[in-house]
Amino acid sequence: MPSECSLLLPRVCAALADPRQSGSDDTCLEKLLDWFRVLTRLDPTVSLLQDNPCLTDFIAAVLALPEPSLSILSFTLRLAGMLAASEHRFQHLQQEQLLVRLFGREGPLNSALWEDASVRSGWVAGVHSMMQHQPALHFLCNGGGIDVVFALQGDPSLFVASAASQLLVHMLTLSVESETTKPLSTVDCDWPACAQMIIKHIEDSLQSSSASHVEHSLKLLTNLFGSCCTPWTKVLWFSIAKHLESFLTEETVQAQHKLANLLLKMAWSPVFSEADSRFWALVTSALECFTPVQAGPLAVGVLRLYKCPQDVRMQALTVLLQPMDCILRAASQPLEYAGLLDESVSDPTTVESLLSSKSSCAGLLCQTLAHLEQLLSLIHLPVDLPYVSLLRSLMAILQFCNGSLSPASPLGNTISRILINCFRVQKSALDVLAALSERKGCDALIENLFDILLAYLESPNTSPTVLKKAFQATSKWLVCLQELSCSNSQWQQTVKILEAVFLVLQKRLCSPCWEVRDSSLEFLTVLIKYLRDQDEFRQCLLSSEVPRLTEDLLEDPESYVRASAVTAVGHLAFITYFSPEPPVMGNQYNKENTIAKLQEILSTDSEGFPRRAVISIFTKWLRQGCTGQLEDTEQFVSRVIQIVENDLDWEVRLGGLELVQVFCNQTVCQLGLPKCPYAPVPSAVTSSGHQNQSLQIFCRAKLFGFLFHSLCDCDKPLGQRACDILIGLRSHFYPTSTLKASQAVEESPAGHSVAWLQRTLRQGALAQNFPIDGGDGMDFQDPESMMLALGTIDFEDLHSELNRCSDHVEKSPQSLLQDIIATVGTTEENEADCY
Amino acid sequence: FFQYCLSGHPTLPCNVLKFKSTTIMLDCGLDMTSTLNFLPLPLVQSPRLSKLPGWVLKDGSTFLDKELKECSGHVFVDSVPEFCLPETELLDLSTVDVILISNYHCMMALPYITEYTGFTGTVYATEPTVQIGRLLMEELVNSIERVPKAQSASMWKNKEVQRLLPAPLKDAVEVSMWRKCYTMPEVNAALSKIQLVGYSQKIELFGAVQVTPLSSGYALGSSNWIIQSHYEKVSYVSGSSLLTTHPQPMDQASLKNSDVLILTGLTQIPTANPDGMVGEFCSNLAMTVRNGGNVLVPCYPSGVIYDLLECLYQYIDSAGLSTVPFYFISPVANSSLEFSQIFAEWLCHNKQTKVYLPEPPFPHAELIQTNKLKHYPSIHGDFSNDFKQPCVVFTGHPSLRFGDVVHFMELWGKSSLNTVIFTEPDFSYLDALAPYQPLAMKCVYCPIDTRLNFIQVSKLLKEVQPLHVVCPEQYTQPPPTQSHRTDLMIDCQPPPMSYRRAEVLTLPYKRRYEKIEIMPELADSLVPLEIKPGISLATVSAVLHTKDNKHVLQLPPKPPQPPTSKKRKRVSDDVPECKPLKSLLSGSIPVDQFVQTLEKHGFSDVKVEDTAKGHIVLLQEAETLIQIEEDSTHIICDNDEPLRVKLRDLVLKFLQKF
C-alpha cells in the first residue's frame, strides 16, 4: 500500500466506524472494496493487516456498535471476506475472533439486522471471497454456516438466492478439488466431508416434495455443470441420475424448464461423450415428455452440438420441426407435400392442439421460428434441415398471416383465423426467411416466394416494422436470385421481379410514414451494395423513378431519413457518376450538383445524423478512388475539412479525420512511395522529391491545422486519432526517426512558432481558442514549419497522455480516501454550525 | 316484433320495425350502384361519348339502339341515371309513424319515401346529419339537372327484353324499382319533415316507445338508435366507427342489455385497414405529382375528405408538395368546408378543445388561407382561370357517372402520368371505370372505410352482450371472393339472425310484461296477506284505464246509485259492473292427510293412484273420483250434489283463503 494511503487509512476507518456518520456514500464504499480487492490479490501475506492495524480495529469497532448502519455492516462483511481470502490473514483474523463474530452464529446472522437483504448479500459475498482455502471451508462447514447458505438459496431477494447458489457451487468445487486424495470413481465415491454435505443436500432436495427445493437443486446443478467440466462431475451425475429420471415419470414435480436448462448445460459439458447412453436416454425422454414449448430450448441446444448421438438429434429435430410440419400439412392438400417429418416418428396431436388455440399458437410459432433462426445463423450446422419443406412451411405461415392462403383442412382454417394480421409471427417468419436465403436448394420455389414477398411489400396493411423485415428478406433473396440467374440464365424472371420491386419501392419512398421511407432507403442501399455489378439490376434501377425520388429525400423533414437518403445517394453514385461507363442520364443527374448538395448538407444541416452520413459517404468515395485525379481530390478534401473542422458533432469531426487518413495514405501511395517501409521503391523516384510534393499537398489541403487542432479537441477520441495520423505522417517524412533537440529547433527560423505549438499541445483540451490559422506566427500551411513540427513534437508522449483516462488523477486510491475524509469533515463542520 | 327489410344493401339499409304499437322506419338508404349501368353525363360536349354506336341485338334488331350504347366493349343505358329505391310494396309506407336517420349517407332515399308514399309522420335526425345530408342531395340533384337529357329509357327494362341483353344489364335486379333523381323542391319538402335531435335525447313515441340517438363515431352527427319500452330494448347500430377521426367517439355503453341488436353498416372493405389506406393514398398522390402528373380523387363532398385534407396538411410540406394546388370542386364545396368548422359540439374531444382557443377545428381552414386548397362550385367560371397543373382535384361523384369528375376523367384519362385514386368504398372501381376504357391514366384503389370491421364487431358484441343479433345476410358468411376468410363474418352466440331484401322477420323476442301504474288511493286500500315468508298477496279490484299506451289501475267506481229517473243511460256512461269478489284459494293438498281425513269422515274404500300430473283419489263405493293436480282439483261424481259439497269442503280445509 502506498505510504500516503497508509497515513490516510486510519482516519478513513475511524470515520466509517463512527456511528454519527450515517449514510456513507455507497459508491465510495464500492470503490474502496475494489481497491482492497486489488491489494489483497497482490499480496497474500499478513503484513497488510499488521501494517494497518486500523483495519482490524475497524472491524471490531463495527461489531461493537449496538446499531451499525446497514451499508457499513455489509461493507465490513465483504471487506473481512476479502481479507480472509489468504490463509495467513484468515488465521490472523481468526485469532482476533473477528471471523466468528462476523460470519458465525453470534454475528449479524442472528440479529434483527439479518432482515435486511444488503446484510445477507454482504454475508454471502464475504463468505464467497473468503472461500479460497480449506480452513475457510472447514470454518463454514463445522460452524454450521453451510446450513445458512442452503437456506439462503430460497431467499426472497433474487440476488442473495443466486449468490448463495453460486457459493455452493464454488464450495463444492473447492472441496472436491482441494480435499480429494485419489480420483473419484463411480463405484467408490469417497467425497470429502464438505462436498458430501452439499451433495447430500442436493439429493435430499431432489427427492423432496417441495417444488422450490427441487428447483434450488436443479439451479445449483445447472450452475455447476455450466462452470465446471472436470471428470468428477460425471461421478456426481451417477448419484443424481435416478432422481432426474424420476422427474420425467412422475408428473407431480413441475420443474421441466429448470430440468431442460440443466440437461442443456450437461449436454454441452465435455465430460459427457456420445457413449454416455444413460444421459442421452434421459435427454431423449425429456424431449419426448416435455411440451413443445418446454422442449424447444433443449432441442435447439442439442441440435447445435457436434457430439451427440444421431437418435437424440433426430428427436430434437422432431421437436423443433413439428410445428412447421403441422403448418405445412394444415396449409396443403393431403399428399400434396411430403411434410417435414416422417409421420411414423411424430405424433402431432399436442402441437396441433397448441396451434389451434388462440393463446398458444403465436407463442409456439414465434419460439420455433426464433430457434430456427438461431440454428440457421450458424455457419456450420451439425444437422441437415429439410430446407425446401421449411421454406414451404414459412411461405404458408406468411400467407396465413396476410390472409392470402385458402387452407384445405379444418386445422388450417383455425390457424388462418388466428394468424391473420399477427405481426409478431410475420416478423419472426421473415427473419427465418432471410436466414434461409443462405442455404442452397430452394431454387424451385423462388418465384412463388417473391410473389409472397412482393405482396408484403405492396400491401398497405403491412406494418412499418414488418415491412422492414420484409425488405431485409427481399434483399437477401434478391442476391440469391441474381446468383441463380447467372447460373441458369433466367434473366427475364429476374428482370420481372426487379421491376416489381422498384415499382413498390418507388411508392414506399413516398410514404407519409418516415419509418417506411427510412427502411426503403436502407433497402435500396443494401441492394446497390450487393448488386451494383449486375447489368440487369443497374438497368432496372436507372429506368425507374427510384433514383430521382431518392435524391428528393435529401430534403426530407426527418433527419434519419435525410441521413439514409445521403447514404443511398452516395451508393447510387457508384452506378451513376463513378461507373466506368456512366449511363446516359437526364439533366437532373449531375455529379457536381449531387456533391454540392451533400456538401451543403454537411455544412448546414441542423441535425447530426445527416452530416455524419455525408462525411462517411465522402470517405467511402475517397477510399474507392471515386473523387477523381489527385488535384481534384486535394481540393475536395480541403473543402470538406474546412466544413467539418468546426462541426459541433464530434463524430462528424472524427469522420473528417478518417477522411484525412485515407487521403494521406492514398497521396503517399499515388506518389509512388509505398506505405510499407520494406516494399521496394521504384528507382526512378527519389524519395525526397516525393516527400516534398506530398508535404506541399497536405499543406495546401490545410490538413495540418485540422490535425493539430484535433490534438487539443475536448473529445478525446479525436485527439487520439489525430495523433495516430501525425505519427504515421512523421514516419513517412522521417523514416529513421530521431527527435530534433528542442534547443536546435528554437534557433531555426520556424522554431519559435513550433515551440509555441509544443507548449499549446501540452495544455491539451485546456488550450484556449486554438488558432487554426496560426498563432504566434505559426503557419500550418507552411511546409517547412510543418516538417519541423513533425520532427520536433514528441507524439508518442502526447499519445500516452491522451490514452490516460481524464480522471486518472481523481481515480487514485489516495484521492478516494481523501474524499471520504472530506465528506466526514463537512459533516463535522455542519455539526459545528448547528451549535 | 316484426322487421320489414326494404333494402338488401348492408351499408344503405332501410328497415321498418313494428315495435309495440308503433311503426318505425330505420334509415332510408338509396342504392346508387344502379347508376353504373348508365353512360356518364359529360359537362362539356364529349365527342367520344356522343358518337357511340347504338346496341344491336344478335338478330340484327335495332329497336334498342337509342336506349343502349356500346362503349369499350360494354353496353350502357343512354339516359338520365336512375337509382334503386327501397321496397315500397312490402308494407303500406303511409303507416310508418317515424323515420330514424343514422347518418347523412343513409337518408338519400328520404324524398322518395316522404313525398311519394303518403307518409305523414315525423323524421328524426341530428343537425349535422340534416345539413350535410342536404348538401349531398343538393350536389346530386345539381349534378344531374345541369346536364339535361332529352330521353329516358324504359324499353330495356321489359323483362323479355332484359333477358336478351348482355351482362351486367341482363343481371341487374329490381329494375322496376329504379327511379330518376328527385328535384330540389322534393328535397326541401322532405327535409322540412325532419325534427332535430341531440345525442342521448329521449323522444317519446305515443307513450309506448322511447327512442334515443347515440353517437356512433362514424361521421359528423352520425347516430345509433335505442328503441325501448319499459321491458324491451332494441338497439339499432348503423355505420359506427371506433377510430379516432373527427367525429365524437362512439357511445358503446348505452347499447348494453339489449334484447335485440340490429347491426348494419359495417365496413365494406374489411381487409383494408384505413390507416394503411391513407398511407397508400398519400404515397400514390406524392409519386404522381412528383412525376409531373395530376391526381383525381372522386369523392363525396363531406366525410372522409375532411380526414384526407388533414392528412395532406401534415404531409405536403414533408413530401415537398407545398407548391402543388389542391382543388375541391363541388356545388356545395364551400358550404361543406364551412359547415365542418361550426359543428363543434359534434366533434371529437381534440377538435372541440381547439374551438375554445379559438382555432378552427379542421386544418383545412389554414390550407384555404394559405391558398394551398381552393374550392369552386364547378369547373366553369373562376376555376378555369386559376387552374394550374400538376394538381390534385377532389370532386364528385364517386360513381364517375355524373358531376365534374366526368370532365376530369375525359381530360386526364389519356396520359399515364395522371392517377385517379378511389377512396370511397361504395362503388366497384372497375365498374366505375368501364365506360372510360381504354385508359392510360393510372388507377389506384385505396378505399377508406372507417366503419366497424369484424374484429371490432366481435369485441363490441362481447362488451354489450345483446340477447339476439339481427344483421344482413352478407355478414353471416365470408365474402364471396374470399370464401376461406371465415374471420370476415359475424361470429356470436346465439348465431345472428339474417335478413335479405323484401323479407319480413319475426324478431326472436316475445313481450312478457307491461308496466301498469296503480293510483295511490287504490294502493292504500290493498291489504296484503303474507302467504310465504317474504311473499304477500292482495287481491285488487280496480278499473284498468288505458290511454296513450299508458296503463293505470284506478279505484273502481262506487256502486251505482239506483236510477233516479227512467232516462235511458248513454252507452258512454256505462261503467263496468263491479261484481262481489270471490275469495281466492292457495296452497297444496297433502294426499296422505287428505286420505286420512276422508277415512275419518267415513269413506273406507279410498284408493290413491299416482298420475303424471298429481294424484287421483278413488272412492270406489261412491263411484267418485277426486283428481288433484298442481293447479286444479276436480271432483267427479254422478249427480250426488251433497256428496260433492261434502268432498269440496274437505278439500277446502287444506287450502288458504284470502
Image (cartoon, coloured by chain):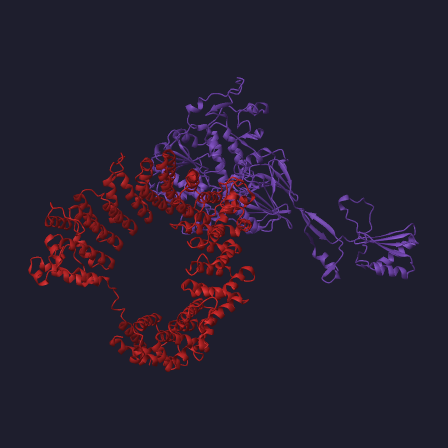
Chain colours: A red, B purple
- Residue B102 position, x and y percent, is 54, 43
As drawn, A490 above or below A681:
above
Looking at the image, residue B203 sits to the left or right of residue A36; the answer is: right
| Quarter assignment of residue B395 | top left
B191 or A762, which lies in front? A762
Residue reaching furthest top? B60
Q: Which corner quadrant of the image does residue B329 belong to?
A: top left
Q: Nearer the viewer, residue B272 or B197?
A: B272
Left or right of residue B22: residue B378: left
B423 lies above or below A218 = above
Residue A59, percent from left and from top: 36, 79
Instruction: Quarter of the image for the N terminus of chain B: give it.
Output: top right
Vertical relation: B483 (above or below) B346: above
Asked whether B102 or A172 is in front, the reply is: A172
So how many labels did they put on this image?
Answer: 0
Locate residue B378, reporting x and y percent: 41, 33
User: Left or right of B511: which side holds B413?
Assistant: left
Q: Does residue A254 appear in the picture of this structure?
A: no
